[in-house]
């Protein structure tokens, strides 16, 4: 019979490839870890490690490393499923969401969820779109919230609301780039927000890996322009604040504007800010909750999806 503890210890040792470091991470002695590995090798009848310096995995060890992750993941899912069957009085739910989107969306959902299910242990994992997609695939989170399409396989989706990415342009930028023609350019952008019209203007973008940046890059490519990018950062609020100050043009989700009542007041403190609907289909999309199709979905996750679809 497989000893799950041996497998858990093996995975740490296989990742570290150093028994001393692995033992320290596991809070056990190096001798104890070595004994666990010897027992595992005896159980399977193979050598898992080449005990050289540095330590390496044998072919059998490489194979077990891949399978051990699957076995332990299945074990965890089985325990969660059985706990749900037993009763739904306690549980754990981990949700992946971007920093800014979480601040806008979660206050709409979590209070209602907490009121109905006070004993569910909630964990929030924040990151950009690529990071969250990977976390979902590797089982680090139960659900992710983001724009469709999610760029990984085996992800089921539940649409929750429409979303649109707007172009944010300050009068300051237009005055520098189009002296004497600001009102004319604004009228043209209001009629059709064509990026090619702004090809000489400075742009402020969030880092690659974020969904809004991916959309921006695709729109630039479709417009056949190479943008003058003056700054890139991970924080979408930073690029908006700098755009408000007239440093450049940026892109910003409409949801973030409509749900932040004080935004326009803040904008008016600095300059006149203009938000334009983009004439590109890719700027219009759907916000959705993603889940791993091959993983068991807990009752806690199902209830979160239900409340999210009702509230948004």
Image (tube, rainbow, N blue to C red):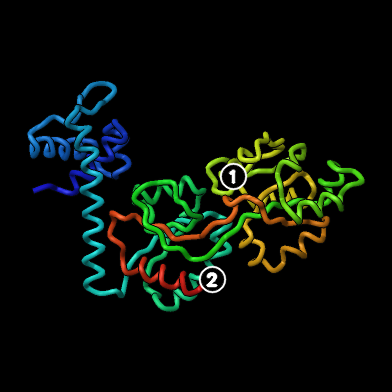
Image: 260 above or below 171: below
Q: Residue at x 41, y 64 (%)?
A: 122
- Apparent side of residue 278 relative to residue 147 in the rendered image (left or right): right
Q: Whole-percent x and y of residue 177?
A: 84, 41
**Nearest to viewer (mark 2 / mark 1):** 1
Mark 2 and mark 1 residues within 8 Å of each other at the beta carbon: no
Q: Position of residue 134 (x, y in %)?
A: 41, 46
SS label for mark 2: helix
Residue appearing at x 72%, y 57% in the figure: 275
169 sits left or right of 20 in the view: right
Q: Spatial distance from mark 2 to mark 1, Cα to Cα? A: 25 Å
Image point 23% across, 21% down: which residue? 52
Mark 1 is surrounded, within 10 Å at the Cα level, by few (under 14), some (14 to 19) or many (20 or more) other residues, namely many
Question: Left or right: where does residue 257 sit relative to residue 161?
Answer: right
Count neighbours of disc 2 (C-alpha within 10 A) and say few if under 14, some if 14 to 19, many if 20 or more: some
Image disc number at residue 213 = 1
> Can you identify the residue that label 2 sits on?
108
Query: 115 or 231: which is nearer to us?
Result: 231
The front one of 95 and 39 is 95
Instruction: Please state the horizontal and vertical placement of residue 310, each as a whole percent of the image.
Output: 47, 74
From this view, report whether residue 104 is shown above or below residue 74: below
Furthest-bottom residue in view? 116
Identify the residue shown where x is 31% and y is 55%.
Answer: 293
Residue most extreme to the top: 53
- Residue 5 shows which numbered tag? none
Please tell me in which quadrant of the rendered image residue 60 appears.
Answer: top left
């Amino acid at each position: 019979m497989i000893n799950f503890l041996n497998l858990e210890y093996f995975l740490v040792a296989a990742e570290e490839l150093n028994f001393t470091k692995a033992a320290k991470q596991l809070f056990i002695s190096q001798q104890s870890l070595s004994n666990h590995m010897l027992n595992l090798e005896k159980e399977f009848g193979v050598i898992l490690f080449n005990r050289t310096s540095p330590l390496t995995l044998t072919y059998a060890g490489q194979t077990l490393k891949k399978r051990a992750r699957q076995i332990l993941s299945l074990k965890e899912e089985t325990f969660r499923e059985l706990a749900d069957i037993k009763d739904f009085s306690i549980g754990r739910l981990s949700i992946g969401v971007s920093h800014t989107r979480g601040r806008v969306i979660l206050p709409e959902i979590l209070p209602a969820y907490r009121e109905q299910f006070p004993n569910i242990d909630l964990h929030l994992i924040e990151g950009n779109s690529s990071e969250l997609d990977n976390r979902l695939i590797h089982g680090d989170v139960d659900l992710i919230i983001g724009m469709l399409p999610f760029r990984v396989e085996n992800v089921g989706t539940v649409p929750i609301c429409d979303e649109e990415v707007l172009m944010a342009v300050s009068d300051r930028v237009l005055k520098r780039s189009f002296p004497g023609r600001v009102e004319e350019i604004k009228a043209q952008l209001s009629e059709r927000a064509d990026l090619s019209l702004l090809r000489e203007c400075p742009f402020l973008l969030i880092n690659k890996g974020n969904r809004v940046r991916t959309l921006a890059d695709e729109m630039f490519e479709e417009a056949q322009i190479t943008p003058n990018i003056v700054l890139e950062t991970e924080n979408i609020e930073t690029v908006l604040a700098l755009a408000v100050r007239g440093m450049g043009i940026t892109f910003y989700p409409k949801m973030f504007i409509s749900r932040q009542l004080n935004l326009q007041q803040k904008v008016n403190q600095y300059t006149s800010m203009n938000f334009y609907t983009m004439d590109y289909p890719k700027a219009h999309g759907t916000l959705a909750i993603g889940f791993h199709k091959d993983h068991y979905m807990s009752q806690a996750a199902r209830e979160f999806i239900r409340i999210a679809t009702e509230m948004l």
